[in-house]
Image: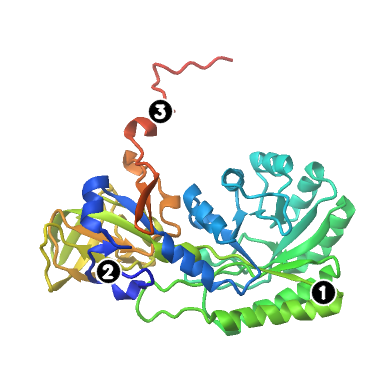
Amino acid sequence: MKNNMIATQYDGKVLTEIAGFSISQLVAEQGSPIYLYDAEMIRERCADLQVFETVRFAQKACSNLSILALLKEQGIVVDAVSAGEVLRALAVGYSPTSNPPEIVYTSDIFDREALQVVAEHRIHCNLGSPEMIEQLAEVQPGAEVTLRINPGFGHGHSQKTNTGGPQSKHGIWHEQLPACLERAKACGLTVVGLHMHIGSGTDLEHLAQVCEAMEKCARLVGPSLKTISAGGGLPTVYRAGQTSMDLAQYHRLWDAVRNRLATEFGHAIGLELEPGRYLVAESGYLLAEIRAVKRMGENLFYLVDAGFNNLARPILYGAYHPMAICPVGGRASSENRDVVVGGPLCESGDIFTQEDGGVVSRRSLPTAQVGDILVIGCTGAYGSVMGSNYNSKPLAAEILLDRGVLRIIRHRQTVEELIANERSALETVVTR
């Protein structure tokens, strides 16, 4: 398989290799389920965005330390949405004091741990709620800050991923910006950045509306503004019929806004992009062994040893992921069957082939039998990071495939590790 192979080229087909590695051999040696990442695909997606002077990875999409280190090598900086993500970024060598900052904390609240970490490491903050202004001023007096603005409208493939408009919790409502600027000034904070992210999509007409809203808000901030952030939302093609973003036109729209503001304010304005899944989604594969093939009425089920504890996007959003079959032992069939793909969890919603609203659907996949491998593609974003221990299932291993080298970047969790912090009632002693 070529490193630049897109999802639609293997969806519904037989697939035996990833980045030159045998899928069946990987599973035989490492067990299943496992996450694989193709490092070269990540490098290619980073190169796509080099026209933007600052590319800030939304590490919530895939926060494994090795993935962050790989992105850092490509000149990508990071966004953090929790104290834990700040500490991850620091652990791989990102600097909190560079210009532009290599780490930005973005959230709609400061929990107490996050506020402490931000203060200790002098992390630049992107504030999504008015109350955060005073809270930050108490621990970082005189700080420069970015404000995240909700322009009053949003966009996305699901309401759950739409990050703008009145039903979204994200950002400072655009009509409250003047009041927040006064609050910041009263607290001694300087607003140097604006951030506006409304969700994902390829609609350039919609994007033009965001640019217009950003420009309007920037003029309210005035010459203290140094940077505007276009947020994220660059789409990934998961299935046939979907379209990718015209990156050149995307950049032209935002570059025009930045240049007009620079002329008006009399100094350069930085332009940031904040992709998450665009950089890592296509690099990731979830491999799971088929453990049962059974008919239930008119439906034929492939049941695998991975569930929504490993990949939650289908049950959360009805998200579509490309799928392929790797036959084991040299067996291969050219015949496809319409099947429902499900996992092992004691939950009727544990179905990978479902649509938004939980409607079970079928997928055309090669004929398979117990022992064959199901390959779920485009799982590098919001895959492993959203894993859970539901049904007391250990977290899957993660493996990075890079230029002919296989590296385990997270060992499979053991049941002993899963229960290590728990105590039985007989062991628990509470003192007052």
Q: Residue at x 83, y 80 (%)?
A: 263
Q: In this rendering, would 347 be left or right of 57?
A: left
Q: In this rendering, would 207 be left or right of 32?
A: right
User: In front here: 47 or 144?
Assistant: 47
Q: Is residue 320 visible?
A: yes
Say what amino acid the circle numbered 3 marks. Answer: Ala
Q: Quadrant of the N terminus?
A: bottom left
Residue with the mark numbered 2: 361
Q: In this rendering, would 7 be left or right of 163?
A: left
Residue 210 x, y percent position in the rendering: 66, 76
Q: Earlier in the sequence, mark 2 or mark 3?
A: 2
Q: Residue at x 57, y 60 (%)?
A: 57
Residue with the mark numbered 3: 420
**Alpha carbon separation for disc pair 2 and 1:** 49 Å
Q: Nearer the viewer, mark 2 or mark 1?
A: 1
Q: Secondary structure at mark 1?
A: helix
